[in-house]
Amino acid sequence: MAFLPSTLPSPHAEPEPGLAGESLCASDLLAWRRTMLALGGRPADFDWLLDLAGGIPWAELQLLRLRPHQPLRLRGDRAGLEALWRRHLQHAEPLQYLVGLCPWRDLELAVAPGVLIPRQETELLVDLACAELAGSCPAPLWADLGTGSGCLAVALAQALPTGSALASDLSGEALLQASVNLHRHGLGGRVQLRQGDWWQALEPWWGQLDLVVANPPYIPSALLADLDPVVRDHEPCLALDGGADGLAAIHSIVAGAGRALAPGGLLLLEHHHDQSAAVLSLLDRAGLDQPSAHADLEGVLRFAAARRPRSAENTPSPEPTGLGR
């Protein structure tokens, strides 16, 4: 277990060859867009590339159809953008890795190979955490287990400015990326980064944590081969593979929560779309209070919450084997 101070400067990625910028008119851009889409891929993905790498937001792109002679300037030139698009089509490389950025909530996060790309549904963990803490804990000690890119750590540090914060990950590569994102958003001194297995990384704070969030690996191993190649072949297996039933990491986190959380402390988990009942059962068997399920934006039960009992007589017995991965 190691402490990693969040002191890395935010690096500036080297621009792709041919991304120096280009001036053209709207009709030329739209004609070129049609040519690129004829190569394959989804229009929404190409428009995302135009936005993040080309500097043409989706709303502006729609207006250009009504103003074919409007001059504009790409952040990168068409040759460079085409090279990125072809790499995406030919090798299923995630556009987020190719551009080095991922929009998430109201944030723009740096991402790179070796770190899970933040998903939209995970945004709700921040809202759930803030709703649960509202008015009850003005200065919480909170932690993000398996922080990855640091997306949850950044968002919670912004939403809970009076709290004290920790973020952990087994991967040193992920912790470096989290540090980049914390500095990118002016939060480098707000969140302590720790390297280690789940609760083991936070051992000095066991029994004091008011809130813990986690988006652990939860995909059953047998399903990994069926994932889209853009995920299966490029995103880190460490952040995806949840073991035979998809619950290996969740089991470890739940088993250690009774000792690591403060009395009344809240655990919030993301899980696979079909694991709600199993996760609620794990929370209940671990002796945690108020286990509850929460839906994502599509109505799928994707999150679970529970608290450590406040009274000593109801506190779960320590389970040392559950404190690591």
Image (spheres, helix red, strand yellow):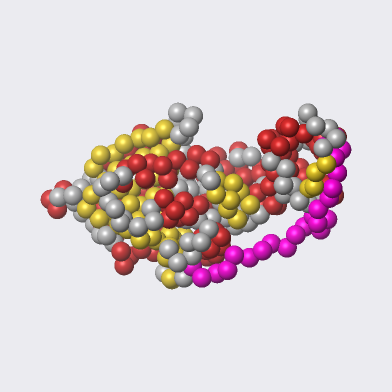
Locate residue 269 relative to residue 154 in the image: left or right: left
Quadrant in the rendering for residue 33: top right
Which quadrant, please, contains the C terminus?
bottom left
In the depicted structure, whether residue 13 falls above or below residue 212: below
Q: Does the magenta stretch include residue 145?
A: no
**Where is residue 78 shown, x and y percent of the image?**
83, 47
Identify the residue shown where x is 14% and y is 53%. 312
Q: Which residue occupies the foreground of this view, 44 or 59?
A: 59
Q: Can residue 175 be seen in this view?
A: no
Which quadrant, please, contains the N terminus?
bottom left
Locate residue 205 relative to residue 146 in the image: left or right: left
Q: Give the range drawn in magenta.
A: 6-28
Identify the residue shown where x is 76% and y is 51%. 75
Identify the residue shown where x is 41% and y is 50%. 159
Locate residue 185 relative to residue 88 in the image: left or right: left
Q: Does the magenta stretch include residue 19?
A: yes
Identify the residue shown where x is 27% and y is 60%. 208
**Where is residue 225 shown, x and y percent of the image?**
60, 42
**Where is residue 258 shown, x and y percent of the image?**
26, 53
